[in-house]
Amino acid sequence: MTNEIKAFYNIGRFLNNIMLVCCALALIICFFTTYDKSEVDTPTVEIKPYSVANLEDGSKEYFFDLSEFDSRYSGVMFFTAHQTVLAYNSGKQVYSFTKLGGFWGSTPGACYNFISVNEKMTNVAIIIKPMYDVIANKVPVFTLAHHIRCMMNWSAILLLDFAPVFL
């Protein structure tokens, strides 16, 4: 009777091992055959304005043509320091950062700006007004990316900016 139990136990163990190997092979096959590129894989692209206008109040208006980019790109990102920002699409305001520092300051301070765009927004105008003459000629680096990629970039930049504070 013990030999029959051992034989039954060995057959069950063998079948379990075969099922385990089959499941592992199925997972490996699924992994290599169902790769889907996600929106986060969208590269960050530096964009240049096709035109820049100097306005009477000292601000600059940057004009961008976004018609060659598809829906994977969902925002324009750039950094400003002591500058107000307005963004327009077809004459309609789509973004504004004009809040002054309140009690502690008289400028908007430093900020990473993210302007949400979609595939229908082909021409975007961004007006940047410096609060001080020292930064009047500073041109921001404009990047176009997916909003999740922008958040990942911001997190990395903030981590690098504030890392010395904690060390």
Image: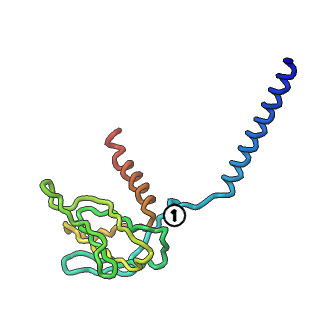
Name the image quarter holding residue 97. bottom left
Residue at the limit of the structure toward the left, as seen here = 103
Residue annotated with mark 1? 42
Q: Position of residue 158 (x, y in %)?
A: 36, 51
Picture residue at 75% right of the left edge, 40% below the top:
19
Q: Position of residue 151 (x, y in %)?
A: 40, 56
Name the image quarter holding residue 109. bottom left
Picture residue at 43% right of the left edge, 67% below the top:
74
Picture residue at 45% right of the left edge, 59% below the top:
149
Q: How is colour applied across the structure in the image?
A: rainbow
Residue toward you, 56 or 137: 56
Could you tell whether 43 is left or right of 143 in the image?
right
Could you tell whether 6 is left or right of 67 in the image?
right
Q: Is the residue marked by circle 1 packed among few (<14), some (14-19), or many (20+) residues within 10 Å?
A: some
Residue at the limit of the structure toward the top, as seen here = 2
Name the image quarter holding residue 147. bottom left
Q: Quadrant of the N terminus?
A: top right
Q: Amino acid at mark 1?
A: Thr
Q: Is residue 53 above or below residue 94?
A: below
Q: Quadrant of the C terminus?
A: top left
Residue toward you, 19 or 74: 19
Q: Secondary structure at mark 1?
A: loop
Q: Position of residue 91 (x, y in %)?
A: 29, 81
Picture residue at 23% right of the left edge, 67% below the top:
84
Q: Position of residue 115 (x, y in %)?
A: 35, 67
